[in-house]
Image (cartoon, rainbow, N blue to C red):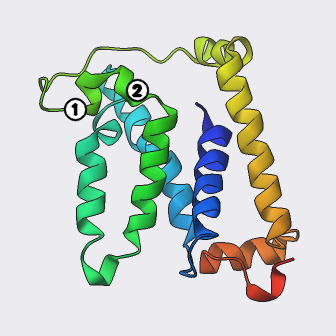
Amino acid sequence: MYLLGHLGIGLGLAWLLSTRTRQPVDYRLVLLGAILPDLVDKPLGFLLGLEARLWAHTLLFLGIIVAVSAIPRVRGLVYLGFGVATHLLLDLIWEQPWIALWPAMGTAFPPGTVDVIALLAVLWTNPVVLTGELVGTGILFAFARSQGITTWRALVQFLRNGTPSPSSSV
């Protein structure tokens, strides 16, 4: 999965679940969590000559976030953990158990290289990836429209608060 798929589908799942509860969701943390594993691991993988799925793609990383979110003062980090969980699900991380279960299956990560051309080729040749990007984009637009985030001002307010303004909801 790529950026828009992770952001849109992660947000969409949180949005869907939020309809089942009256508790407000900090969607900023969901969005950050949905791309956090790549924000951490891709630069590290490039710098270290390793593959692009490293420590932030592990269940240990997710577990630490969830455990820290049990502390009352930072309870909102549960939304960050939710975003990370959606990222791992969309990356089909169980197909790489040596990463998902790190360090249980060894502490070394496979070497790798960043090939931008190959990454773009996957986007255009893999129908699952392309569909994920299109679905994610559609969800982002649907969320923005349904929550009244249709102007820069509304977007800035959303980014400040993490939840859509009650007055901007349609």
CA distance separating discs 1 and 2: 16 Å
Residue 148 in the image: x percent, y percent? 84, 73
For mark 2, what is the residue?
A: 52
Relative to 100, residue 127 above or below: above
Q: Residues within 10 Å of mark 2 (few under 14, many from 20)?
A: many
Which tag is nearer the camera, tag 1 or tag 2? 1
Indicate the secondary structure of the residue bearing disc 1.
loop
Residue 126 in the image: x percent, y percent? 67, 14
Of the residues shown, which amino acid type is indicated by label 1? Answer: Leu
Q: Which of marks 1 and 2 is nearer the N terminus?
A: 2
Q: Residues within 10 Å of mark 1 (few under 14, many from 20)?
A: some
For the N terminus, the quadrant is: top right
Residue 97 in the image: x percent, y percent? 27, 24
The image quadrant that residue 151 belongs to is bottom right
- Residue 38 seen: no
The numbered mark at residue 101 is: 1
Of the residues shown, which amino acid type is indicated by label 2? Answer: Ala
